[in-house]
Amino acid sequence: MQQDQLGLFDTPPGRRQIRLSLAVVAALFAVLLITLPVRNRPWLEIDAFIPVLDSMMLVGELIVAAMLYAQAGVYRSRALTFLAASFVFQALLVIPHALTFPGAFTSQGMLGGGNATAWIAVFRRLGFPISVIGYAWLKHREAGDRAGTLGADPKIAFTIFATAALVALCTALSTIGQGLLPPIFVNRTEPNFLNLALINALAIALSLGAMTMLMRLRRSVLDVWLLVALSGWVIQSLLNFGAGVRYSIGWYVLIGLMMVSSLVVMLALIAESNRLYARLALATAARDRERDARLMSMDALTAAIAHEVGQPLTGAIANSLASLEWVTRDQPDAAKARKAISAAIDDGNRTAEVLKSIGSTFAAGPITPSEFSLNELVRETAAFLDRELAGEKVALELTLDEELPGILADRTQIQRVLVNLFTNAIESLSATRRGPRRISVRSTPLGDEEVLVEFTDTGVGIAPGDETRIFDAFFTTKAAGTGLGLSLSRRIVEEHGGQLWASPGAKHGATFHLRLPRGALPAL
């Protein structure tokens, strides 16, 4: 049985996520191409630009870290813990970056001028791809231990304190110890192009290495958006080769791309988490309805058995005791003993007949026929299950013959059958992730006496040889199924004089055929 996918860490990306991620990368490259011709053109010096963007990146990256730490707690994953710590590292570094930036708060920066800001930016630029490489390596190591077991305690609190200490060390090295580092800027605005080029080349190499390691793994939704963020880092480094001059158009675009690369993971995580939570809510509601229906069915079945079987069994026991009494007397009465035994046998036969009929009594209940449009009932049932269809992103195609005549049947019981057929199709589609997700319902008259409704889905289909077994009571291919839905549905249809059968699709999926007579119900 396939494991439930609990979050973005183990949910494979769908075509929608892949297309959207490629579109974002294409947009980032378009920005690079547009900016390159004017990258060194001077622009206004906006002192508040860096503090504002750094504040946005601080909040966004802390949100990403909190979400990743939450996932790490669920999976007990060191890979996720390491990645979350890297976002804490990125977030905390923007604080000294803003405080040291010349002109942001003071003309020389509050924590020292010179190259302090540039080296803090370098630590951020190199730290992200290095952290993704570590995440990919740890994820690869954990892959073999994930099935059915929890990993080791990721020690989340320890990583937060260790990351804060590393940020303090980088800040001290960039400010107090900046004389130990090669200069990146020769003055407030002009860079040392050789050192800047070497750093950007190293950043590109690390980013491409991280992307290669991610692509070799079994990718998840999280991995796809990490690839998008790394693509943004590569584009930034390419732009930074020739746009290192501060307050130029290229420099402003570079800082903006840095923010986009930082926040794209946050936006993706929030959007995909909300989608997963919505699916979870719909699945929970459906399971609650199924559980309530199952409990009601079991209560009804228990009551029917107790009422119908109790009386003949009581009679059989009484007659058996009476025959025993006649046989064990000092003067046994064989005639009366035979009569009591015969009565007990009759009671046993009566019990057997009751057990044969209990299924139909439980499944269908009293039939109350009325004339109605089967097309309208199909549309009403589809509207009732609209949330389930939307939650699984299932497209519904209704091809209903508007000339379809009305039928005489129990409307409530026929709707039970339709609900079961819709639900089975949705559950079949939820078990597959490839190909179109579609349910097609077609109605057509069969001569003058019958109508036919066909439900076709593009789900997992029916295993060879199971076309008839799926209608047997208690036979099910679902882990949480009862095996009663299709059995009871067929009994309802047959009691109306119709037929219900299934056939496999040509390539995938299955079709369920529901044939019902137009006229009066058969005698029961």
Image (spheres, grey):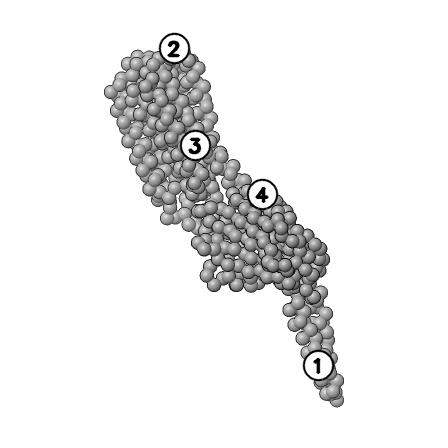
Q: CA distance from mark 1 to mark 3?
A: 80 Å
Query: Cα distance, mark 2 to mark 3?
Result: 34 Å
For discs 3 and 4, the disc positioned in front in the rendered view: 4
Question: Which amino acid type corresponds to the residue marked 1 in the rendered image?
Answer: Ser
Q: Give the mark, 2 or 1, whose residue is nearer the N terminus.
A: 2
Question: Mark 3 and mark 4: span between their CA atoms?
Answer: 29 Å
Tell us which disc is closer to us: 1 or 4.
4
Residue at figure coordinates x 44%, y 28% from the top left = 263
Residue 190 seen in the figure: yes
Q: Which residue is mark 3?
A: 265
The answer to whether residue 271 is left or right of residue 325 is: left
Marks 1 and 4, the one that precedes in the sequence: 1
**Structural distance between the alpha carbons of marks 1 and 4:** 59 Å
Name the residue rendered at 50%, 59% in the picture: 503
**Front one among 129 and 283:** 283
Residue position for label 2: 107
Q: Which residue is mark 4?
A: 387
Q: The disc labelled 2 sits on which kind of residue?
A: Ser
Hey, which quadrant is residue 172 in on the image? top left
